[in-house]
Amino acid sequence: MAFKNTTGLKANEPGWGSTKSDHNENCSRLYCFSTRTSRRCTNPTLESEGTTDDVSTEQRLKHTFKTSTMAYFLLSRLSLVFLIIIFLSVACLANFYNDFDITWGDGRGQILDNGNLITLSLDKNSGSGFESKNEYLFGKLTMQLKLIHKNSAGTVTSYYLSSKGPTWDEIDFEFFGNLSGDPYILNTNVFTQGIGHREQQFYLWFDPTIDFHTYTILWNPHRIIWSVDGIPIREFKNHESRGVTFPKNQPMKIYATLWDAEEWATRGGLVKTDWSQAPFTASYKNFSAEACIVYSGVSSCGDTSNTLGLAPWLSEELDTTSRKKMKFVRNKHMTYNYCSDSKRSPTECKLG
């Protein structure tokens, strides 16, 4: 199957994947300060009494002093709010030296370009991988990837979130390699308390080996959204009230790996890895995070049970336009959906 964009839309088209967030309405002609627990509005307009054309010099001085004092107060409060926002939700463009560790591969994983690029390689002896130094409990996490060129059959390249332990949580992007000229399969999955089997798979509408493309996981207390180049392709909602588990209590690290899975990865294992093409290499760059970082068990966002006043991504959801685009991509490019598998009967698939 040759690569062909059948969406009728450009992957980087402005507006793709646009979202909406819960925002307080602006006070008319007021300066508003919003924190996690309270909201204060201050009217900076001076009262009109005593401001006629014939006001005295003393009155003008008092007027000026009052204005300056209020301006200083407003600037001070704005600075405080800015610091609070930074504290509550850390947003950063990563330097891989500072934010990630190569964890396995015996030199097959490399940090290059002054910390702006990571490459992972796979040969017959070993693959490679890296992980984040930080743990996150909710975040909007983005990475750009360029996948293995030409014949990548039998290989799996991944970018995912995972906690540890026997009842771990996990949110996956996995890319199953294929023969030259055939499209990659993008596999998405979510594990809650150690239970997965929630695969949804797609043929990408572009060649992911020619250039870097952007893959985003939005994970907040209400939903998980997987996006490709800003285009939402999947949503997993929080239906805990209906008996469906949702990953919201276990901090997760970011992981990336390149490894050999020829026994099952390509056409159910019928196509094996061609080791004459090794080493296989995948590249990662431009990681960014708007996220709640967990330090010693404490989240930088505090209590997220009520997201009012917190960073917008913590309550972000798909708007009508984004839902239409997600539906279009799923209709045209989805190749497997566990919700349609007659051997399974997942509760969440019946809830919408």
Image: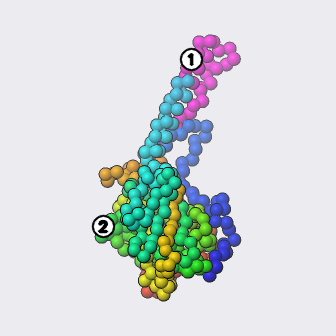
Residue position for label 2: 165
Determine which of the numbered discs, if any, sits on residue 252 in the image. Answer: none
List the residue tagged with mark 1.
62
Structural distance between the alpha carbons of marks 2 and 1: 66 Å
Q: Considering the image in quadrants, where does the N terminus appear?
A: bottom right
> Dot 2, how many residues are within 10 Å of its Cα: few (below 14), some (14-19), or many (20+)?
few
Observer-nearest of 86 and 184: 184
Q: Amino acid at mark 2?
A: Gly
Q: Quadrant of residue 134?
A: bottom left
Q: Is residue 173 left or right of residue 320?
A: left
Task: Write the residue at 32% across / 69% down.
Answer: 167
**Relative height, residue 279 to residue 253 (above, below):** below
Foreground tag (2 vs 1): 2
Crowd tier of the residue under label 1, counting other residues whose Cα lies within 10 Å: few below 14, some 14–19, many 20 or above = few
Q: Is residue 13 left or right of residue 309?
A: right
- Specify start and end residues of the magenta stretch as a single range: 38-67
- The stretch drawn in magenta includes residue 199: no
Please tell me in which quadrant of the rendered image residue 241 appears: bottom left
Marks 2 and 1 in Cβ contact (< 8 Å) = no
> Relative to 121, is 48 above or below?
above
Give the SS element for disc 1.
helix
* Residue sitting at the far top: 57
Q: Could you tell me which residue is drawn at 50 percent across and 51 percent down? A: 114
Q: Residue at x 52, y 54 (%)?
A: 113
- Left/right of residue 66 with respect to residue 163 in the rendered view: right
- Kindly tell me whether residue 31 is visible in this rendering: yes
Instruction: Choose between 316 and 174: the one closer to the eye.
Output: 174
Residue 66 in the magenta stretch? The answer is yes
Asked if one can make out residue 304 in the rendered structure from this viewpoint, the answer is no
